Image (cartoon, rainbow, N blue to C red):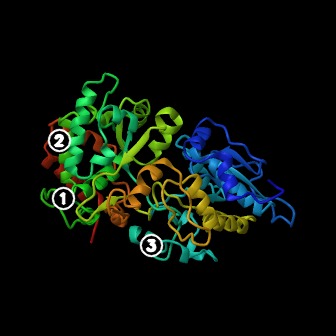
Amino acid sequence: MANRKLSRREVLQLFGVGAASIGLAACGTEPPSAGPAVAPTSGGEAPASGGQAAPAPAGDKIALEVKSVQPEYSAQSKQIWDVYIEQNPNVEITLVDVNEDTQAAYDARIAAGNPADIDTQAACTKANYQQYTNLLDVADFKWELYHQNAKTGFEQIYGIANYVPMVNTMAGYYFTFIHYKDKMEAAGLNPRQDVKTMEDLETFLAALKTHVDENPDLDYVMDTGWHPWVLGTVFPSAMSIGLGQGKEAQRQLFQGEIKWTDMEQNPFVPYFQLYKDWYDKGYLPEKWWTRNWDEYENGNIAQKSILTFHGPWQWDKIEAGNPEAGAQLDGFPWPANSENQLYVTPTTTFAFNTNAAATYSSLKDKPNAADARKAMLWWYSPESVKLQAEAIGSNAPAMDLSSVGEPEIRQTQWVKVVKPIKDGEFGQLTFDDSLHGKDVTERFFKDGSENVMESDAQASLIGDFLENTITLEQLMETFQKRWDAAYQIG
């Protein structure tokens, strides 16, 4: 690789896109590389050199440590950074993977003032945002290329002006139905063609229930498990939109303009009514709120169910864990509301599932700080973001890529469902990427409080409601009490 510049297409050919590269990362191997420019390591310890030497003279190596996007995408991250190294051959990059098992050790490094030089999946809240460099103070950041909320999003959510710790390079995540096309055809069902409205969805699920009951190899109609973010924020928001409740009403609820106990105006009431109806009809797994998320995903990969509702990750996991089944993946959107809107997570987010890069304030005087800043700016550049979209992305870039051309996103959910939606196959639909109700009230959240819905404590509450131990009115009363305890507005 040191002899010539690696083209974008060659990068993609080196490690593939989607399932193939996910599988490589999951198996602990890496695709072929022409040189060891980027060395992988774990996140618990800093590399021995630490990049602490004096600024390197021309021709000497500059050491940078970079926290990767996600361990699952370590191979892709490595190859993207190899492109930067082609352009900057005096740079050596050590890639650090941090997952749930090593997060505590990495957090200890942050506390000790010795984090990675660049974090490419940074996340923060109003409690710790100052650990990251303020991008408003970084010269040459191309604000004009980014989405309109890039400069103001942090203030919108947390109420903190004149500070931008990070900017998402990608738009939000899409949640859609996933099904196995061949299995649906065997059942005589074609949900992609037939499901356009909530009534269509009900008819389809009833027919699928009949098929599942007649086939001992299938355990569930619509598979799911417990995940506090998915079941506490995403599903209620996404599904409520199809039930006629937009995000604006959800924001009003969290801002206290609508009471949780207002059964007529609360936008989540129809969602809980729907889930109760589906549970009573046997469409959902028994006691699904006690079911481990990994158990659910693995069962779906093994085709114990042929339908689920999920983000892009399950598509990738199916293709990696069961390639034969992955070749049959298809999907369709949740029905749109009366304004032809569908759900997508907000582009502007900071605390969870970001696609954002940052440098740390504690390293501002480190000898390689200028080199880290230069590399971070490249990660935010159109060239790099296009590579990220093609190699890792399951969503659209959140910046202007006219200088390099639009990416060819090949992630399966995008190809099978999202792009066809955008191309009009399912009608003239649009995605609502505005903030959740929880997002706009983060500034008012009392530190240490229990989240109203996005909490493991909610699992048993939902179970009590679904099994008739409490009524829906009592569930909403509990949510109102939790909201009262968690927020101080006005």
Q: Nearer the viewer, residue 405 or 91?
A: 405
> Residue, x 62% and y 46% (percent of image)?
16
SS under mark 1 = loop
For label 1, the crowd category at 10 Å Cα-Cα, with few meaning under 14, some 14 to 19 and many 20 or more, is: some
Specify the amino acid type for callout 2: Asp
SS under mark 3 = loop
> Residue, x 70% and y 66% (percent of image)?
369
Percent coordinates x, y for residue 1 in the rendering: 79, 53
Ranked by sequence position, the earlier of labels 2 and 3 is 3
Mark 1–mark 2 Cα distance, whole angstroms, equals: 18 Å
Specify the quadrant of the image occupied by residue 340: bottom left
Q: Quadrant of the C terminus?
A: bottom left
Ranked by sequence position, the earlier of labels 3 and 1 is 3
Q: Which mark is residue 266?
A: 1
Specify the quadrant of the image occupied by residue 154: bottom left
SS under mark 2 = helix
For label 2, the crowd category at 10 Å Cα-Cα, with few meaning under 14, some 14 to 19 and many 20 or more, is: some
Which residue lies under the disc numbered 2? 277
Ranked by sequence position, the earlier of labels 1 and 2 is 1
Above or below, 251 against 24 in this view is: below
Above or below, 17 against 219 in this view is: below
Mark 2–mark 3 Cα distance, whole angstroms, equals: 39 Å
Specify the amino acid type for callout 3: Asn
> Residue, x 57% and y 42% (percent of image)?
22
Which residue lies under the disc numbered 3? 149
Specify the quadrant of the image occupied by residue 468: top left
Which mark's residue is nearer the viewer, 2 or 3? 2
